[in-house]
Amino acid sequence: MTEIDAVPRDRLSHARTWHWILAGALALACIASLQVGATDVALSTMLAKLAKGEALSQMERVVLFDIRLPRLVMGVLVGAALAVSGAAMQGLFRNPLADPGIVGVGAGAGLGAILAIVLGALLPVWMIDLTGNQLVPFAAFLGGWGSTLLLYRVSTRHGRTSVATMLLAGIALGALAGALSGILVYIADDRQLRDLTFWGLGSLAGASWAKVLSAGPLILLSISAALMLGRGLNGLALGEATAAHIGIDVQRMKSIAILAVAGATGAAVAVSGGIGFIGIVVPHLLRLASGPDHRTLLLNSALLGAILLILADVIARVVIAPAELPIGIVTAVLGAPVFLWILLKRRGLVEL
Amino acid sequence: MKSSNKKNTPFKAIIMSMFSALIALPVSAQQSADLTNPHADVLSIGGSVTEIVAALDQQHRLKARDTTSSYPPDVINLPDVGYMRSLSPEGVLSVGPSLILAEEGAGPPEALEVIRAADVDFVEVPDALTPEGIMRKIEIIGDALGVPDKADALAAQVETALSTALDDAERPESDKKRVLFVLSTQGGRINASGTGTTADALIRMAGGVNAVTDYEGYKQITDEAVGLAAPDVILMMDRGGDHGAADDELFEIPAIKLTLAAQTRSVVRMDGLLMLGFGPRSAEAVRTLNEALYAPKT
């Protein structure tokens, strides 16, 4: 309790009001996402029709319920997953540059996806039948989750996980996964290469209820677990030893954080491909706005991550309609300047 | 009861099947009439598919195209739904097609599922690497558009033109030139076509020999293998710009410098879609390449 009481009360309540502001903004973003798209179908006209008791056309039903709604739900889940994971990793590694990819999820998921895209056709028929269209997401999830568990195992000695080892081993593992991916890229034909490129840029375009239902529970569970970590991460900010002295079970917290991040990010990357910058920019924005207290930061990150990803998705699908941009391009174009600004600002603080 | 029932069964079955045939006949006729609605608004995906639609005089029905559709030139003005392998379902539906003609491999599958759910007819046109394949493409597209007669006429026309072009292109094995198809020379690294590609098929149809047969598909080839392949001519896609400078650059690449192609400065540049589309202009492609390969330099 001691370190938490040191935080001024008004700052905490200030951060709590952000919950409400962000929740309101999220609701608005959701409405915008259902309202806007390449077709003329709009939420408002549909509601008006329903109010008058008119039947919806098949086009309206398909666009709203089979295209925009699953896409919206997936955007909320993926955005929240990435942002919460980013906040948790920055807290755990006590490093402002940490993002969900730091535990090897990105590299592993990328390798899994490439394996499925390039070698998927070589699998036995029953396996192809079993996974159907979902082979790539499935392989990406296994790759991401598997590489994180591997990293966690090699960094844990005598029941104690070394965060530094994990960071360095993650770099090595990433290089290895990159090399294996390179071999597969070499044997890929040009169609597969384009598929790979598009996968790496991420998109919510493939959203379907099947994907939402398969990734959703895991993402929700992982986010809930991560949201419990606020107090622990606050303690950890003082250093592992101090955190242990003030009664935080550091090892247990590390395990929960890593597994939750692997689950949330692994599932998110599996259904949407590689989406950058949400995980790293969102927590920083919130720290600037409402302070670094993880008890509010984690939930605020989830909300803001969802908002930003939904808005980025609206841009991605409207800006060059009827075609659409991969969402990774939008998040990077918007996120990179913001991130740069944060970096320069921080440097200014340090150097002054 | 049992026995009479058994005896009845075959009889019943025959009657039933006759009935169902009677009922089914008009139904199936109606269904096919539905499928071949001659007024359907069309979204065409794939360069050669769009070309065939235009060659069938149905270009006025095109509502939109994909990025690879660039011929006839005025289709560029149609809305572009993006790259054929990463279609956005809502984008596709927004152009309001009632029929989608797509080259094999259009996707992703999730997008197609949603599009089908919206009651839009979807016809996949298989890839072709042979003259027969081109005829089949024309036939499938003609049927889907409800203009089978025009399709027959076009197919016959293309077939005649193509077989004449193929006959004219044919020459004795010893006389055939070795052709290296270079997809790109980015950073001095040569990406060349092996076997099983449309480039390989066209080279053979135009009376040439593909210089690279050691691998399938398009791959980066080592410098020394280019020497071994010993191409007489280099074939590339025409990307516009200054060919003189581009040629100088091409023949300065060490791997290519030593080949016969470089010594005689033999490079052929052709429009990518004409060359690799395998659409109705295939005869023209064969003839153009054949003439470029064997006609004396002017």
Image (tube, rainbow, N blue to C red):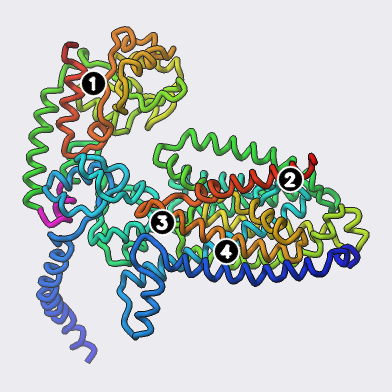
Q: Which mark's residue is nearer the viewer, 2 or 4?
A: 2
- Residue A328 horizontal/vertical position (percent): 52, 49
Which-is-in-front pick, marks 3 and 4? 3
Q: Amino acid at mark 3?
A: Val
Q: Which residue is mark 4?
A: A77
Label 3 neighbour load within 10 Å: few <14, some 14-19, many 20+: some
Asked whether disc 3 touches disc 4, contact meaning CB atoms under 8 Å apart, the reply is no
Q: Which one is in front, B262 or A181?
A: B262
C-alpha distance separating marks 2 and 4: 30 Å
Label 4, label 1: how far apart the Cα atoms are: 56 Å
Mark 1 in CB contact with mark 2 (< 8 angstroms): no
Q: Earlier in the sequence, mark 2 or mark 3?
A: 3
Residue identified by numbered label 2: A346
Q: Vertically, is B51 above or below A5?
A: above
Res. A318 mark = 3
Callout 4: residue from which chain? A
**Which chain is mark 1 on?**
B
Quarter of the figure with residue A14 = bottom right
Please say whether residue A255 is visible from this viewpoint: yes
- Secondary structure found at label 4: helix
Instruction: Give the CA separation, mark 3 to mark 1.
Output: 47 Å
Up the image or down, A297 lies above or below B82; here it is below
Depth check, mark 4 against mark 1: the one in front is: 4
Camera-side residue: A39 or A16? Answer: A16
Q: Quadrant of the N terminus of chain A?
A: bottom right
| Residue A28 percent location from the top left of the image | 52, 69
Tell me if A268 is positioned left or right of A59 in this view.
Answer: right
Is A239 contained in the magenta span?
A: no
**Given the current orientation, which residue lies at the most extreme bottom position?**
B1
Q: CA distance from mark 3 to mark 4?
A: 21 Å
